């Protein structure tokens, strides 16, 4: 998706090509400090972090301002919203990109972060390494897919933009590896899909595509770590980029100030990661 920001519901992502005047995408670490009378500090933290994003634009064109206004006031529905920012180099989840999950998940598709596409193969928790996952390919046809957990399985995309995928490091090192990206319609049905021999594939999202699912085929039987995978909304998928995730977001704060000259407007949005957004 290049250097521009996209925001909206899946299937109706809106592009904002004007640079923000302020862009804070810090995660809320959920850390609290307690200092005793003796001066000792105790730190507690929540089990997971929450992404909070603050965006500001100065003198936005009317069309862009109206689009953001509709999203903030939930005119077209309660949400949740997708936010694809140009800083995110890997939209896989942080643990997912590192081949990690909840210990004890076993062969339950790594808590739905991965799934086997073929009849053969399995996602397994590595023995002696709790919370570390791998893919066991039973034969050359065994194929693995990545799920976007926050969005019930598929990664939201916008037609006409670029997307790229690189297989995990262990699978990428194989001379038999193949990768592909399945583009899907709004109902999740298959639309089309580019494929490539080797660990990397890139393509332009076709018209009618709302979601995408990246897949990899090791091509050789064996068990392979899932660490190092990357799905990027441009052509830059690489093993060294940590996962940013693609959380569901809801607008919590919104200001709309008329700018000079009219009809330009200055917009401020604050969004927070949510498990769901309702009316």
Image: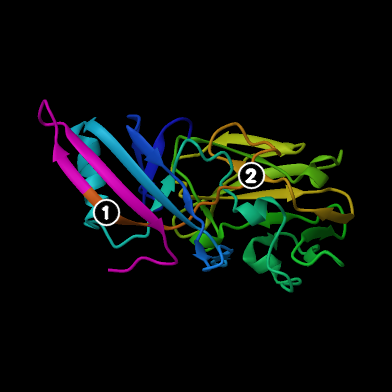
> Is residue 78 at least partly visible in the picture?
yes
Disc 2 to disc 1, C-alpha distance: 29 Å
Report the front residue among 131 and 196: 131
Image coordinates for residue 133, horizontal then vertical, percent: 76, 61
Residue that numbered label 1 is attached to = 253
Total numbered badges shown on the rendered structure: 2
What range of the chain is rendered magenta? 255-279
Report the front residue among 189 and 98: 98
Report the front residue among 273 and 150: 273
- Residue 187, above or below 24: below
Residue that numbered label 2 is attached to = 242
Looking at this rendering, what residue extends furthest in the left direction?
Answer: 262
Labelled disc at residue 40:
none
The residue sitting at 61% across, 47% down in the picture is 243
Q: Is residue 269 magenta?
A: yes
The residue sitting at 77% across, 36% down in the picture is 198
The residue sitting at 20% across, 36% down in the picture is 266
Q: Residues within 10 Å of mark 2 (few under 14, many from 20)?
A: many
Relative to 29, is 256 on the left or the right?
left
The secondary structure type at the circle numbered 1 is strand
Q: Residues within 10 Å of mark 1 (few under 14, many from 20)?
A: few
Image coordinates for residue 234, horizontal then vertical, percent: 54, 34
Residues at discs 2 and 1 in contact (Cβ within 8 Å) = no
Which quadrant of the view contains residue 62? top left
Relative to 48, is 218 on the left or the right?
right
């Amino acid at each position: 998706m290049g250097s521009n920001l996209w925001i909206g519901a899946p299937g109706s992502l809106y592009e904002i090509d004007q640079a923000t005047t302020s862009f804070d995408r810090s995660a809320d670490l959920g850390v609290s400090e307690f200092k005793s009378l003796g001066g000792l500090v105790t730190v507690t933290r929540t089990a997971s972090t929450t992404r909070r994003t603050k965006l500001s634009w100065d003198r936005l064109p009317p069309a862009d301002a109206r689009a953001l206004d509709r999203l903030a006031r939930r005119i077209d529905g309660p949400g949740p919203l997708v936010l694809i920012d140009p800083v995110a180099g890997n939209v896989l989840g942080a643990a997912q990109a590192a081949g990690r999950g909840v210990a004890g998940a076993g062969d339950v598709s790594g808590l739905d972060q991965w799934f086997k596409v073929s009849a053969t193969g399995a996602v397994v928790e590595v023995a002696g390494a709790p919370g570390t996952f791998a893919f066991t390919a039973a034969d050359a046809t065994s194929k693995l897919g990545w799920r976007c957990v926050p969005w019930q399985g598929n990664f939201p995309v916008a037609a006409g933009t670029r997307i790229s995928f690189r297989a995990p490091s262990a699978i990428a090192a194989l001379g038999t590896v193949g990768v592909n990206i399945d583009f899907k319609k709004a109902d999740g049905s298959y639309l089309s899909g580019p494929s490539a021999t080797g660990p990397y594939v890139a393509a332009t999202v076709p018209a009618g595509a709302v979601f995408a699912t990246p897949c990899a085929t090791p091509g050789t039987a064996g068990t392979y770590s899932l660490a190092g995978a990357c799905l990027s909304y441009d052509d830059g998928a690489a093993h060294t980029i940590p996962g940013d995730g693609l959380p569901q977001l809801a607008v919590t704060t919104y200001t709309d100030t008329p700018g000079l000259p009219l009809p330009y407007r200055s917009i401020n949005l604050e969004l927070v990661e949510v498990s769901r957004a309702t009316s």
